[in-house]
Image (cartoon, helix red, strand yellow):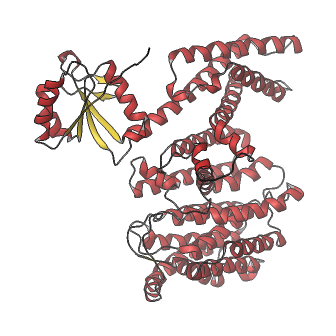
Amino acid sequence: MSFQLKLILSGCVSLLACVAIMPFVIKLAKYKRWVVFPRSDRWHKKPTALMGGIGIFVAFSGTVLSIGGISETNYWMIYAAAFVMFLVGWADDVWEVKPVIKLLAQIACSFVLIYNGYIFGGGMLEWAGIPLTFIWVIGITNAINLLDNMDGLAGGISAIVAIVSGALAVLNNEYALAGFAFAIAGSTIGFLFYNFKPALIFMGDSGSLFLGFSLSFLSIAVQGKMGSSSPVLMLLIPISLMAIPIMDTTLVTIKRLAAGRRIDQGGKDHASHRLVALGLSEKKAVLTLYIISAIWGILCLFMYHIQINSLFLCVLLLIIFSVAFSLLLSKVKVYNESPEKLSYLEKRGLKIDNNFTFRFFLLHKKIMIGLCTDILIIYCAFLFANKATQVNLKYDYIVLATFICVKITVLYLSNLYYRMWRYMEVLEVAGYFIFISIATIILVVILYIKDRTSTYTLYFFMFDFLLTFTGIVFSRLFYRSLSELINRNRSSEKKVIIYGAGDSGYLLIKEILQNHRHELKPIGWIDDDPSKYNQLLYGYKIHGGKKQLLTICKKFKPDMVLISTGAIDKDAEDQLRDLLGVHNIGIGRFSLTISYN
């Protein structure tokens, strides 16, 4: 039998086997009362069968034991370790195994990989690869477990990772490994027939721990024949494969620590939940994460075939996108409290005074994010300017380091990192222009003193300056746009029409959007000045005036009309209240007062 036919059979047989087995697993789960009931910290709304991992593992095992080629390789111990993880997960689903037992099992299975020569970095990192292998296996195994938080999410991401891993194994001529990967992909896709919304069964820990360990093995195994001549490639491949689980786990961990919550505490604060909070449906949220994972997977395949230097810009842009995407999700409010406030932690008796690192992160997280973003922008600007002006010097990396140090130092000394980006004004844009200009002048002087024959031309410095200035200003405006996007798409709030499209109304709509405490969502304006009709103020349309009020209310169905203008006196307000009260629409007033002696 040719290896191509074996690979096709591995995927198809495991898929069909899982599809055939799963109805019996669902009946067994219901008979044994292996059912998950709705809880406040869980997403599902009705009792759902558990133990989908049984169907996944049985379909996978039947495939690899019959046509997967395990008997011809050293994968027996790997299969045994995966079986152990399945058993530990199954026991946890039934009896709730202590976390330390699961951790010990993960450590033991990590040792099996190391014993069989599967070390993170493929031996390139020497002794450092061994502790990194333990960290990688434990981290990815638990990341897939955490990712199992919405119908079809963990299964779909696992299938994508397994398919890409199988393709990489084929490129490496590792056909037995490819069969292993495609068997996992097939059984996981078969499971999705019953797990995609609305889910008939969940995989449970029996499935998530088995898949997590298997994917951590695959992501290390595909490094095997790449050789130490491509160290960046070897490190990027597994990280890129696991981009979504890593991103989700990192986001959840940081936000829970910032909120004073336990990391292992359940909750609706994962990437998928935050996408739903932004206005996506559950299916669209899951499909969005599928697409991002697939893009990273395709990039892995390109990285294998093309020199990493040729793809570096794509990798860098994708990293920037992923960081920006994570920042967008991190801004979504999923806790009732204000998680980043130190007072929140102190009120709950958490001692953070001695934890300087954690306290520093909470207080300065935006500065650190700004520094990291600016370093990437300065790097990209230097790279583009270098390519555009065709400068090629022996000490480019030393010059690049100088550019980063000088520009970051000048920006930090200018106090621009202490500005609140969501309130960025034109004056601050001028500040960035001035201080980046100063940094560029300093760099010109430094390079002239260092090497008067330098081939860095005036055009290079102008190009680098424009790219740096544009990139940094755009990143600040992008951050502000993210905040406004989230604020404009909040759900479960009262819809309001603002009466008075003037200065007071402008202040009111900014207060409504930026202060979540009001739980109000603006949907438009009315104003008695006909010259303003159909214009936009702060992105919302002025629909008409008082004469069109009832027509506008019938069309948009607001919960309240808020008066922001002083032109409406008390008698006119009472008339509006009587008029709107018939239609169960409330009325309120915004007033701005200043008191001083």
As drawn, 152 above or below 340? below
Dividing the image into 4 quarters, which one contains the N terminus? bottom right
Foreground pick, 489 / 243: 489
Image quadrant of residue 567?
Answer: top left
- Residue 223 is situated, as x and y percent measured from the top left of the image, at 76, 59
Q: Is residue 551 visible?
A: no
Q: Residue at horizontal 40%, vertical 65%? A: 197
Dividing the image into 4 quarters, which one contains the C terminus? top left
As drawn, 547 above or below 255? above
Q: Residue at horizontal 64%, vertical 32%? A: 370
Q: Is residue 588 visible?
A: yes
Q: Is residue 523 left or right of residue 6?
A: left
- Residue 325 is situated, as x and y percent measured from the top left of the image, at 54, 43
Q: Is residue 393 left or right of residue 363?
A: right
Q: Residue at horizontal 61%, vertical 43%? A: 342
Foreground pick, 390 / 274: 274
Image quadrant of residue 373?
Answer: top right
